[in-house]
Image (cartoon, rainbow, N blue to C red):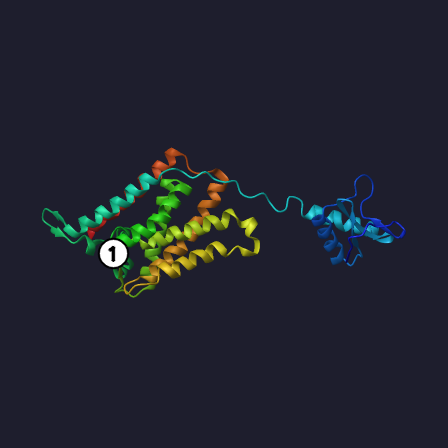
């Protein structure tokens, strides 16, 4: 393939513009792109300046072959690259999301005081609601949910609220509160369940961080699915960013439950991919559906604590 900045003199009849008739000038990028196509098919070609445009020349006996290859190339690449995904307007629900996080902090104070019931005395909520691997394996599945609402201490709580709150607020604005909280609850619950079966029977864990890293996984999956046509071979970048956050935020500390963080992140990716595919096709849930999802999520948490108190 040859490139030239000189005007073609026309004194060499065997060389002709690939397409004749009308304006045969091309942009420089188009001429280079077509020249690479022809070069890959072993068709000689030459790019020359033509006033403000460029000409792509080939030997006269190669004209038909060149035109055929370029037509095939254009047909195969029609509509590529695809248009970027439409920008989705974020939902303004920051205040309700913060209110739920404050409720979680308030509940932590209740666990410090204890709950007194007639005939039961003062209940140790931290013990009743913690995720005990042996108990979960034995059928006390509600612990997978109740453990998400407990924390080992104020530092643990503040860490989840400060760091996790950022991701949760972003997720709620992205998907809507009802869908976001239901996905958070699902990823946290399933993450705790898997962790209980992987860990030793004596393993015990508490904390919302399983759901927090579920949020990280969901956000990574949303970006992966939404930009899948543009990322092409770099599809792993959103997930890699999530893994980096997991490594930075989820592996430090003496009592860090890496398994819970990892499985929360992994299940979050699965739920996030499914959610983004559905939202991309049907749109975000409307107000009624979002409200019902939020009520269902709250009912599951309340129901889990009822089971913990009654059967625990």
Is 60 situated left or right of 176 in this image? Answer: right
Q: Position of residue 77 (x, y in %)?
A: 67, 47
The residue lying at 25 percent from left, 44 percent from top is: 103
Q: Nearer the viewer, residue 12 or 218?
A: 12
The residue lying at 42 percent from left, 42 percent from top is: 174
The residue lying at 53 percent from left, 43 percent from top is: 85
Tell me the quarter of the image containing the N terminus. bottom right
Q: Is residue 158 visible?
A: yes
Q: Position of residue 245 (x, y in %)?
A: 40, 57
Q: Nearer the viewer, residue 125 or 156?
A: 156
Residue 99 versus residue 266 in the image, above or below = above
Q: Position of residue 311 (x, y in %)?
A: 20, 51
Secondary element at tag 1: helix
| Number of marks present in the image shown | 1
Is 145 situated left or right of 59 in this image? Answer: left
User: What residue is shown with label 1?
Assistant: 155
Q: Nearer the viewer, residue 307 or 299?
A: 299
Residue 130 versus residue 304 in the image, above or below = below
Q: Is residue 306 visible?
A: no
Pointer 1: residues within 10 angstroms few (<14), some, or many (20+)?
Answer: few
Q: Position of residue 279 (x, y in %)?
A: 46, 41
Is 93 situated left or right of 22 in this image? Answer: left
Is 127 situated left or right of 234 in this image? Answer: left
């Amino acid at each position: 393939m040859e490139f030239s900045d000189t005007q073609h003199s026309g004194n060499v009849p065997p060389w002709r513009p690939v397409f004749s008739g009308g304006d045969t000038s091309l942009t420089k990028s188009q001429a280079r792109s077509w020249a690479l196509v022809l070069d890959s098919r072993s068709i000689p070609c030459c790019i020359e300046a033509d006033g403000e445009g460029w000409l792509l020349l080939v030997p006269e006996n190669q004209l038909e072959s060149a035109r055929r290859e370029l037509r095939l190339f254009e047909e195969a690449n029609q509509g590529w690259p695809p248009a970027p995904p439409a920008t989705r307007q974020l939902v303004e629900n920051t205040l309700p999301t913060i209110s739920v996080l404050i409720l979680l902090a308030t509940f932590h104070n209740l666990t410090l005081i204890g709950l007194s019931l007639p005939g039961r005395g003062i209940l140790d909520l931290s013990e009743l609601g913690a995720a005990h691997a042996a108990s979960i394996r034995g059928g006390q599945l509600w612990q997978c949910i109740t453990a998400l609402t407990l924390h080992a201490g104020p530092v643990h709580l503040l860490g989840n609220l400060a760091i996790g709150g950022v991701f949760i607020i972003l997720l709620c604005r992205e998907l809507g509160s009802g869908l976001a909280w239901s996905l958070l609850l699902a990823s946290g619950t399933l993450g705790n369940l898997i962790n209980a079966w992987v860990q030793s029977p004596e393993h015990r864990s508490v904390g919302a961080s399983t759901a927090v890293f579920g949020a990280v996984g969901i956000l990574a999956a949303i970006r992966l699915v939404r930009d899948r046509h543009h990322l092409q071979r770099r599809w792993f970048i959103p997930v890699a960013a999530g893994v980096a956050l997991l490594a930075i935020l989820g592996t430090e500390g003496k009592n860090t439950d890496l398994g819970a963080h990892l499985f929360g992140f992994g299940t979050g990716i699965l739920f996030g991919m499914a959610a983004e595919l559905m939202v991309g096709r049907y749109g975000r849930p409307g107000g009624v559906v979002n409200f019902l999802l939020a009520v269902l999520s709250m009912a599951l948490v309340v129901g889990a604590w009822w089971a913990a108190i009654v059967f625990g």
